[in-house]
Amino acid sequence: MAGAAAAFSALAGAEAALLGVAGAGGGGVTWASAPTMALPVHRPTVAPARFQRTPVDEARGVRPGPDLDEERAWFRRAFRRQLAALAADVARVLAAHPALPDGADALEYATAVRLYLTAAGDGVDQALRSAEPGGHVPFARCVAAGTRPLPVHSGVTYAAADLTRADLRRIAQRRVLTDWGFTNALAEPPADLPGDVEVLIWSATGRRTGALETGDGVPSRVLFLPGTAFAVLQVREPAAGAPGRLLLRELSAGDAAADGRARYDALALAALDRHVAGGAGPGTPVPPAAARRFVGVPGLR
């Protein structure tokens, strides 16, 4: 990866190619011409929980089609200082994981993931779920590109939520929830997440981010890309001091046929039920600064 770091240094030392405002996100938003970028700040939401709107293409964190040249050039310019500070460390991480791609583009995408996983990325998902265009969109697209090569986690993942009974009933009426932000979950049961509802998600393509986590990060994090859909398998309201429970399954392109989906839903529900019956053990602590990433339900704002 020394070659990748050198290639990046050459790129960082030169001006990015000039970008016109065409394709800048529509609605007068000109992220492509912005010289710098401040990531959005997370702001507390108010009850009741709301379902996310489906964004237009210009506001989606995963771009239709493979071409990310414009987003890469923008990211390289807008986050020049962060890239310069992190490039060497991220290059060492990639060199230590031969299964991950190398090259200047892979280094930039992996650096975007590293930034997203820190406190600096706390407001990105909330901004994506607003369905509004802006600078968070090209940033998220670079994060998504850097997330795809990471190892796949197949099996149960964990999160939590703080929901009213009315919220749970509204969720139960929906067959599918689609999250237009990144869905953060855990590969291990958490010990201390806030909330009165346990959320268990059966993952098929969620990515393990451990390789790119910082020292105070969350090594057991599993990340689902923006636009991932989840089948609602079971909803249980809190009762008699017991927490509520929401069981979900990540949907894939192969779930289009109703009969195929029903079969996979049944298999995932049976596996999650077995897991619940077996008990989760003592749980793994989650750093307090990162806890809110794992509190919520995919598809809700």
Image (spheres, helix red, strand yellow):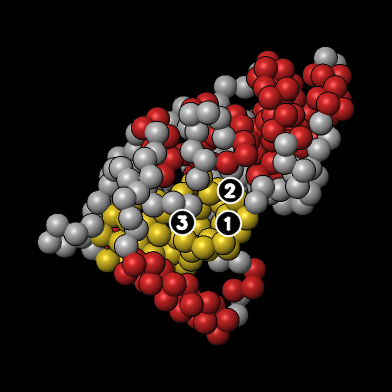
Amino acid carrying label 2: it is Arg
Disc ID at residue 208: 2
Q: For the residue labelled by badge 2, is the local secondary structure a helix, a strand or a loop?
A: strand
Residue 76, image x, y percentages: 75, 25
Residue at 62% across / 22% down in the picture? 37
Residue 120, image x, y percentages: 52, 26
Q: Work out whether residue 197 or residue 42 is closer to the camera in this orientation and state it.
A: 197
Query: Is 203 located above or below residue 98 in the figure?
Result: below
Which residue is the extreme one toward the bottom? 259
Residue 257, image x, y percentages: 60, 80
Q: CA distance from mark 3 to mark 1?
A: 9 Å
Amino acid carrying label 1: it is His
260 to the left or right of 76: left
22 to the left or right of 261: right
Q: CA distance from mark 1 to mark 2?
A: 6 Å
Q: Residues within 10 Å of mark 2 (few under 14, many from 20)?
A: many
Query: Is 36 located above or below residue 70 in the figure?
Result: above
Is label 1 in contact with label 2 (beta carbons under 8 Å)?
A: yes
Is label 3 in contact with label 1 (beta carbons under 8 Å)?
A: yes
Residue at 53% across / 49% down in the picture? 222
The quarter of the displayed image where residue 8 is located: top right
Mark 3, residue position: 157
Mark 1, residue position: 153
